[in-house]
Structures are given as C-alpha cells and as structure tokens.
C-alpha cells in the first residue's frame, strides 16, 4: 500500500489567469487566447511540477463583460489537448464535455483518440448542462433536471461501453499471418436509452490505460453524487471551508460504496486560486494591481459578509476593536468565516478583499509555505485528495508555484517526488478500466 | 490573372495505403492506425511536394473485412489534424464532417479552432450521411434525402454564420486602454431551421484566412450540386473518365453561377490512386504482391466489363486477337473502357487487374511521367482543377510521388514552384470569406 499523497491539477482556460487584469500584465501576450502555444507552455510548466492533470472547464457560450474582461474559456478543450498532448509526456488531460449536448458516439471517439495519442492520459469530465445560453447555441430548450441526469447516465454508459467495445487483445496486426483483427473481440454495444443510443463498436483500440478516466464536477447534489459514485474516478468541486469539504468528500465516498466500489478509487479534488510571491504584502499588491475596479465594488458585499458596514472612505483602515467585537460571519456564505479571520489579522478592507475572500475558490497569497500550509491542512483533515489550482497570471504564476510550492510539499512528504507512471490512472492512483465500471458487472 | 495550375491534395486515412496488403509491407509499422506520428510523417512528405491539402474521408462505423483488412478510416479527423497542424506550416486540412449527425455549433467551434491553430489552413468537407451503420452509431434512423439536404443547408448556413459572428476588427486587446473586445462586433446569429438552430455568437476570432474553407464531396446529384454551388470552394469527387469528369465539372460551375458566384471559385478535385515505380512492370508486381486474393476474385467481373468471359486458367494469358475483336466496354460501368484499353495494350488479365481497373478511382502505375501524363491530360481537357491522390503504401508512396511526379509537373509548368501563400484559401486560389458566402448577401 503506497502512502497517500496530494494530487495536483491545473485549470487551463483562456491563457491569461484568474485576475481580471491578467491579460494586461506587461509580460503577457494579449492574444494568448488564440494561441495554443501559450497553453502548451503552461501545461509544460505544470508537468515540470509533477501535476497529474490539466483540467479544462468549459462554457461553450459567451459570457458578459468582454469589453474589458476576457473570454474566460478555452478555444476548444479537445482540440487544444490533442496539440498539448504531443508536447508533454506525463501530464493528463481532464476535459469537460457535456452529456446534455454532445452525442455519446462523438464523445467516445474523440476522447479515446486523445487517450491513444497521449498514450493513456485522457480524462472526461462528464457534466450536465443547464445554462440557457449554452442550450441556445444548440438550439434547444433547457431540459429539466430529471431528464438531464437520465441522459447523463445513458451517455456515460454508452461512452464507456463503446470504449470497451474493442477488446484488449482484439488487435493482432500480425504481418506474417495477415490477421489484422480478431473480429469476435470487436463487438457492437447496442445500447439504447430514452434520450441517446448507439450501436457501436468503436473502431479504436485500447490505450495504455485501457480507456479514458471519467471525472465529474459540481456541487454535491444527490443526482451528481450518484453519477460520481457509479462512474467517476475523480470529482472536481469548488468548496470554501474544510468542514464543507469533509462533508462533501464523505458523501462522495458513501456514494461510491453504495455503488459497490472502493471509495479510495474516487478522488475528491478542490479548487485553489494562487498568487505566489516572496511576501504576502507583495502578493496583495500584485492582486490589487490586476483587479481593476473589482476591489472597490465588492466593499458593500464584504460588509454584509462580516456584519459590519464599511464606508468607502475607510477602505484602507483596518477594522477597529469595536467593529471586530460586533463582527460575525454570515452563515449563508461560507466565505464569510475566512473574511472575518483575515479581518482579525488586522488587514484593511482593501487588503481583505485583495486576499480574494470573495472569489470562486479559496485564494492563497504569499510565499510557498502559505500555499503548502493550506493544502496540508485540508489534505490531512480529510477535506481533499488533491487540488486543482488556477494561477493569478499563467505566464509567471505556474512557474512560481512549481518553484516555490512544490518543493515544500515534497520536503514535507506530501507530494510524489516524480510521476508514478506515464498514464493518468497511474498518477491518480485509480485502477485500470475497460468498458463499463465495476458497479455494472 | 495568374495562370491556372494543378491543385494537389492527399487522402489521410488509417496510415497504411490503398492496397489491401499495405499494412503487411515490410517497411510498414502494422500499428500505424493508432499512431498519429505516421500521419504526421505523410502530411510532411506531401507538404514537401507543395500539396495544398490533406483530405480525410470519414466513415464513423466499422466496415466488414477487418480480419485481414484494416480499419480504412482515420482515428478522428479533427483530433489528428490538430496535431498535424503543429508539425506543418503550409499544407491545409480538408476534413469530412457530417451535417447529418454533428451539431452545427460543435462543427463551427472545432473547425474554427483548427483554423486558428493552423494559421488559416482548415477546410470542412460538409457531407450528408445516409449510411445505416453510421446512423445506428448515433442511435438514429436514416433520414430521407429531402430531410438530409434540408438539414445540410441549415447546418452550413449556421456554421458559416457562427464563423462570421466574431467580426474582423472586433478584437482590440489593447493592454493600455484595457479594451479587450468591441462587443458590438460580436453578435448572435439567431438562426433556426427545421432541424438545427443556434443563437451564437461563437467566441473565436478570425483566422489568417477569415474562416475555414467549405468543401463538399460525392457524385454530381442535383441536391449535392446545389450545396456545392452555394457554399463550397472545393468539390471532391470520384470519377473514372475525362468525359464524365468534364460533364460533372461543367455542372458544378453552372451551379456556382446559378448561385451568383464566380465558377472559378469552386475547384473540382478528382481522385487518383498511385503506384510510383521505375517501370510499369515493377509497379504491377508491387501492386500484385500487396493485393492478396483480390486479383483472382475480380476475374469474372473483368470478363463482364469487357464482354469476354475469362477462365481462371487463362489469367496469365493476354487476350487473343479473336477475343479482342469481340471485346466491348460495358456501358453501365465507365471503368470498362479503361479496362479494354489496357487489354488492347497486350497485358494479361492478371496484369489488367493489377492496373487497378476495378478500383475506386483511376489508378496510375509506373514512372513519374505516367502519373504526370494522366493529370496533364485531365487538367488540360477541363476535367479537373486538381487531384486528390491516395498512395498504394503511404510509407514510401508519398515520397516517391513527391520525388518522381511533382518535378515533372513543375517542368511542364503545370504545378506551382512553391506555395502561393500560407493559408488554404491562398493555395487553392479562392477568395477570402467571412460569414455567409456571396449568394446570401
């Protein structure tokens, strides 16, 4: 039994970074969005740091705010990953693909092709889509939840069956005898559900890891946990506190057990937004310089979170003893506790906001030890099996993380010294799979 | 006005070649099908020969005959092209994508991503799909022709509109002022038809050629010619004789004119299967050595084509004067004329069949001049604007063509000395396009 280690992943999106002004940073090419070369560089940097995978969220529609913001999405997950796979050797690719708007046969084919091209490094983040803008791009209404999840189950089962439809030892390719395939081992799947169906087989051989790894992502709703428990080897989520994370991870593990699986085979991966700088002060300044008007605009929200109204003219004044005495975390928003904690450290409201207390994930700012401490605490508390990090600015933020954070995690024995293997399954520590998972057998 | 020159394309499929035994050739890796590296090598060889494009036919289902044959299909056109685009600089990618089973939004997104990644070298071969095996992989019945073509029109219009939905000068990305996009130039398309619809916009900027080039392929049916006449810049076809080809090309040009377009903007590209060897005799031997039992099996068919029954024991005996006197080409099969012509040259039935007279396209066998003569004759007769060649064996057949045939075409002034430009449009000689084509404006 190998010792449990932290798994690291990194988001790949539009090539800039999580800060709104990342695309304007002087060392950043503002046309990175259209340059796969940029994402190649960032994936290579993450690979240098031993990351198990890059993760591409996907929102195939145009969000607002593009006048000064960016597209916040990758051009296309599969097309970019195909290219990046040829410029890397060990890092995996966990790519979001909708079960609601993609045909299972296409999903099966393109992900398996990536798995073959990358020598066993592909993963499919199978999600449902309920966004109206996305649905409209496919000319469809938003389906209700029951329908979406029904289709998700059908899609994943068809995709996994297609992946297994070319059996392990089907491909003979013996030049001497002239036998190319044992066609008895290339069998149709003939699966049909209420929403999707496919005959198969898929004309693609096994990869070095058998077939792509299934992930899913989102909040721990019963519907999603059932998907994750049955099919997924990884669950990508956003969560703010250790308590919440422990509860979600426990629910995920119960869902896997309910499906007859070993709960250790489903990895719970939480988000983290990083700014790596020699000191916390430098990190806050870096974040402020690239946040535009976001900081000021969030001041009333911060006041509501900690129960203390803050006037704009006091944005640079740390809270008084009196204010701190009446301050209390809003129980509706788990981020409030973190905001309050930062306030008690004596930071001004501007600095509290620069800490990223109102963001999509926990934000860690400062020297390597800050990030390592955060991950160690969560990991050892059973709140996470790993982290998917998003740097403030990709151009230098990935290298900074690899150079400053990874060595500390290794010193502490929390992170592998090198890649365990060359496939995504090996580096995640999840078993080989071929065709449908255990729960169906 | 530049002089008209031959356009060359090359098929990319499973990495072996058109002869059934190509995968067994001693210099061929029998696992090429799963190795994108092989297709990279072949595309690079074609690029060395100044080819305008590689073309991926696509049949997303499993054909019969895999016991001793091969898959006869590329793993996935878009995924392989993404990779190959990064290992080449000038050659274009004309990839088959079904309008029947693909969502227009996905087609628009993935082809435009390829167009951006390749710096303006993507083309979409937009086809309809009526094959039952393919339909079954998508869990759908085969739609009737009217429905398929209605959906094709809708799909192509949506895709082209999405491609134009991010206007040319929309992307400001000015770091100083902080203006990323002029959002007034990123507009929804809001197109809805009977079968498909999309809101848009597509969040992808123009490529160096504006947007991907549309091709279509098949026989010259009125339905397909209407598609080609309106939308296509290239028409890929299989045709056996100059007369047929001239008629089809003329029909294509009329269809373009009927849509208000310049007929020179739609290139008529015919197939050719090549075996390049120092002598014809060596070429026939090479073909026979990799044809398995196909030659013998086709003997009765050959007899029917030329109106002379041939007994198996006479397979190596050239036709007698008496036989030749009664021989006549079967008017139902345009290949019969070619078979008869080869018979009159004095070849034995085995050699006639080794000439490939019963194959998917005209076959040219022998030294460079044989291939060059064939192309020159067709080109000068107005039977083709270009050729898409498929080598007998990729591993050495592409290089042989580039080394032996291309120089002769250049000597004769029929073929460009170098790439005209770096985009597919430039190398095809078709105008820039953005959004829907001329006929809609």
Image: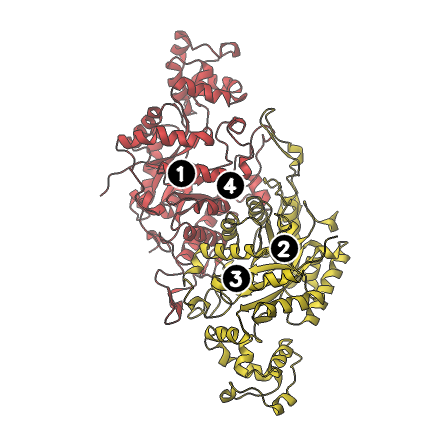
Chain colours: A red, B yellow
Q: According to the image, label 2 marks what residue?
A: B417
Q: Nearer the viewer, mark 4 or mark 1?
A: 4
Q: Which of marks 3 and 1 is in front?
A: 3
Kindly indicate whether the residues beneath marks 2 and 4 are on one polypeptide chain.
Answer: no
Q: Rounded to the nearest whole Å, what is the CA distance between mark 3 and mark 4? A: 29 Å
Chain containing mark 2: B
Front residue (pair A247, B247): B247
Q: Nearer the viewer, mark 3 or mark 2?
A: 2
Q: Are marks 3 and 2 on the same chain?
A: yes
- Pointer 4 with pointer 1, Cβ within 8 A: no
Proximity of marks 3 and 1: CB atoms separated by less than 8 Å: no
What is the crowding at mark 2: few (fewer than 14 residues within 10 Å), some, or many (at least 20)? some
Q: In which quarter of the image is the C terminus of chain A?
A: bottom left
Q: Name the residue under label 4.
A: A36
Q: Do the residues labelled 3 and 2 touch (CB within 8 Å)?
A: no
Q: What residue do we see at 42% from left, 68% from top?
A: B24
User: What residue is pinned by disc 1?
Assistant: A236
Identified at 52% across, 54% down, the residue is: B44
SS class, disc 1: strand
Residue identified by numbered label 3 = B398
Q: Which chain carries label 3?
A: B
Give how far across and how far down residue A114 sits, in percent: 44, 50
């Amino acid at each position: 039994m190998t010792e449990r280690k932290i798994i690291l992943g990194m988001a790949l999106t539009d090539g800039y970074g999580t800060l709104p002004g990342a695309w304007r940073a002087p060392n950043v090419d503002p046309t990175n969005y259209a340059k796969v070369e940029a994402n190649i560089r960032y994936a290579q940097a993450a690979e240098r740091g031993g990351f198990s995978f890059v993760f591409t969220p996907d929102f195939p529609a145009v969000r607002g705010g593009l006048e000064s913001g960016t597209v916040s999405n990758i051009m296309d997950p599969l097309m970019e990953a195909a290219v990046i796979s040829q410029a890397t050797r060990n890092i995996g690719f966990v790519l979001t693909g909708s079960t609601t708007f993609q045909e299972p046969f296409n999903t099966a084919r393109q992900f398996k092709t990536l798995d073959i091209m990358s020598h066993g490094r592909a993963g499919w983040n199978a999600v449902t889509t309920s966004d109206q803008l996305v649905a409209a791009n496919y000319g469809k209404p938003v389906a209700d939840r029951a329908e979406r999840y029904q289709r998700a189950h059908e899609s994943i089962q068809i995709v996994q069956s297609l992946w297994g439809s070319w059996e392990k030892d089907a491909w003979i390719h013996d030049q001497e005898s002239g036998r190319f395939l044992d066609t008895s081992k290339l069998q149709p799947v003939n699966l049909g559900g209420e929403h999707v169906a496919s005959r198969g087989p898929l004309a693609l051989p096994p990869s070095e890891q058998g077939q792509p790894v299934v992930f899913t992502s989102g909040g721990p709703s019963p519907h999603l946990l059932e998907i994750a428990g049955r099919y997924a080897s990884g669950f990508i989520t956003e969560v703010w506190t250790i308590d919440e994370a422990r509860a979600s991870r426990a629910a995920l593990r119960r869902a896997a057990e309910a499906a007859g699986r070993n709960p250790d085979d489903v990895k719970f991966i939480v988000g983290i937004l990083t700014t790596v700088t020699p000191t916390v002060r430098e990190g806050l300044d870096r974040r402020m310089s690239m946040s535009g008007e976001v900081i000021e605009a969030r001041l009333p929200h911060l006041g509501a979170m900690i129960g203390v109204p803050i006037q704009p003219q006091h944005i640079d004044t740390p809270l008084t003893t009196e204010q701190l005495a009446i301050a209390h975390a809003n129980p509706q928003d788990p981020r409030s506790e973190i905001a309050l904690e930062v306030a008690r450290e004596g930071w001004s409201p501007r600095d509290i906001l620069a800490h990223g207390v109102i963001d999509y994930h926990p934000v860690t700012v400062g020297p390597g030890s800050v990030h390592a401490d955060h991950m160690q605490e969560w990991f050892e508390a059973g709140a996470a099996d790993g982290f998917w990090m998003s740097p403030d600015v990709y151009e230098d933020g990935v290298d900074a993380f690899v150079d400053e954070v990874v060595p500390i995690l290794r010193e502490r024995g929390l992170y592998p010294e090198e890649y365990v293997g060359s496939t995504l399954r090996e580096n995640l520590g999840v078993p080989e799979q071929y065709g449908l998972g255990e729960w169906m057998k």
